[in-house]
Amino acid sequence: MSFREKSASVMAILMTSAALYYLTLFSAASRAAGTTAPSLAIFIPYVIFVVAASVVAQVALALFSPKEASAPADERERIVEHRAGNWSGIVLSVLVVSALGNFIVYNDGTLLFHLIMGGLMISQISDYIFRIILLRQSL
Amino acid sequence: MAKRPPITNNVRALREARGGMSQAFLGDAIGVTRQTVIAIEQGRYSPSLESAFRIARVFGVGLEDVFGWDAE
């Protein structure tokens, strides 16, 4: 398994965990406060935690493969990154348009926030999954 | 599963004929990772024209001695 495949796998697991944590965090806050409004007191530490966890995961991977980690993506890896980015962009577009459609029907700005936040996470997870698939198959 | 590219190659045979040159060595010589060399050898990836020329130069042979076209 190449460094980039390992990196994508670790980040896919981390982002999926972060997305599930987000879901439980805000559904718990919603039950406690009787509202689903995003709270900065929860949101900011959450974002800091996810960014810090991502950095720690990448540094840990780089420590095991320093040469591969510092090498730039080669021609095949660049094709994989571009294609995965393109497909995950389509995933994000579909989810954002769906969230906007939901807002037009229900006029719920809070739900719009959570749907777009979820869309960003799903899009990022799909980017990692597309990378793993493309790195393993014929291009 | 994506369709394999129609370009065939003798990279593995040429590597083995050169005293078992490692995939990592060839990768370093042409500026790609070992995994990309593996993908080329397995026919899962057709390299760019530049990398194809680099591979041929490493082996000291012509481009058509390394790569072919599978009409099937």
Image (cartoon, rainbow, N blue to C red):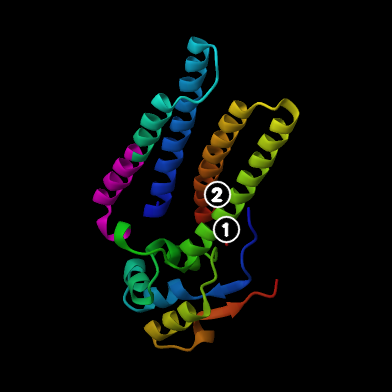
B5 up-or-down from A136: above or below: below
A32 up-or-down from B48: above or below: above
Q: Which residue is mark 2?
A: A130
| Foreground of the two, A35 or B31 | A35
Tell which residue pokes out farthest to the right in this image. Answer: A105
Q: Which SS type dominates the magenta stretch?
A: helix
Q: Given the image, on which type of amino acid does mark 2 rest?
A: Phe
Q: Which residue is mark 1?
A: A83
| Residue shown at the point (58%, 79%) measured from the top left | B68
| Foreground of the two, A83 or A2 | A83
| Foreground of the two, A14 or B58 | A14
Q: Quadrant of residue A99?
A: top right
A62 up-or-down from B50: above or below: above
| Residue shown at the point (64%, 74%) measured from the top left | B70
Residue A129's tag is: none
Q: Is residue A2 among what the camera can see?
A: no
Residue B64 drawn at (x, y percent):
54, 85
Q: Is residue A11 left or right of residue B72?
A: left
The residue stretch that appears in magenta: A52-68
Query: What is the chain identity of the residue bearing mark 1?
Result: A
- Secondary structure category for the residue under label 1: helix
Mark count: 2
Q: Is residue A23 among what the camera can see?
A: yes
The answer to whether the residues at label 1 and label 2 have Cβ atoms under 8 Å apart is: yes
| Residue shown at the point (50%, 49%) measured from the top left | A132
Q: Given the image, on which type of amino acid does mark 1 rest?
A: Arg
Q: Is residue B46 left or right of residue A6?
A: right
